Image (cartoon, rainbow, N blue to C red):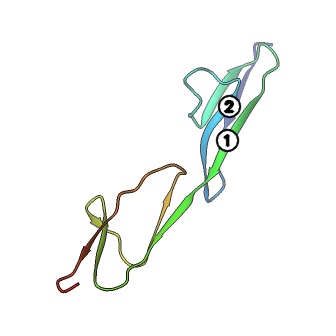
Amino acid sequence: QGEEAYLEAIPDEGWYFKEWTGYVPVGEEEQASITITMDKDKSVTAVFEEYVTLTVTQTGEGDVYTNGQPIGDPAEMIYEQGEEESLSAEPDDGW
């Protein structure tokens, strides 16, 4: 009773920490480390999600850009689930 429990969520490679669920201090659900004051039985869950990969390849001549920067061919980009990416394709002359 009254003791503090320190918890830290450390994801394995290829995964990221998303959130805590259960009895978590208000406003700390997305912090990787939390401290919980034990004043009664409590339960928390660390939610991890796997990164997703976007692979971009090109056919023909031109460049693919994201945020104004060329990404290369082929390109593999890693994202958190639900994250959005904006791509643009600019052909070389004659393509």
Q: State the residue at coordinates (61%, 44%).
A: 17
Position above or below: 17 against 59? above
Q: Please name the amino acid that badge 1 sits on.
A: Val
Query: Mark 2 or mark 1, which has the lower sequence index?
Result: 2
- Residue 86: image location, x then y, percent: 35, 57
Q: State the residue at coordinates (59%, 20%).
A: 26
Q: Is residue 60 left or right of residue 81?
A: left
The image quarter in which residue 13 lies: bottom right
Q: Is residue 73 left or right of residue 51?
A: left
Position above or below: 69 against 85? below
Residue identified by numbered label 1? 47
Residue identified by numbered label 2? 21
CB within 8 Å, label 2 to label 1: yes
Quadrant position of the N terminus in the picture:
top right
- Residue 89: image location, x then y, percent: 29, 70
Secondary structure under tag 2 reads: strand
How many badges with numbers are in the image? 2
The image quarter in which residue 35 lies: top right
Q: Nearer the viewer, residue 22 or 86?
A: 86
Residue at the far front in the pictured view: 95
- Residue 10: tell me if it is visible: no
Counting other residues with Cα less than 10 Å from the Cα at mark 2, is it few (<14), some (14-19), or many (20 or more)?
Answer: few
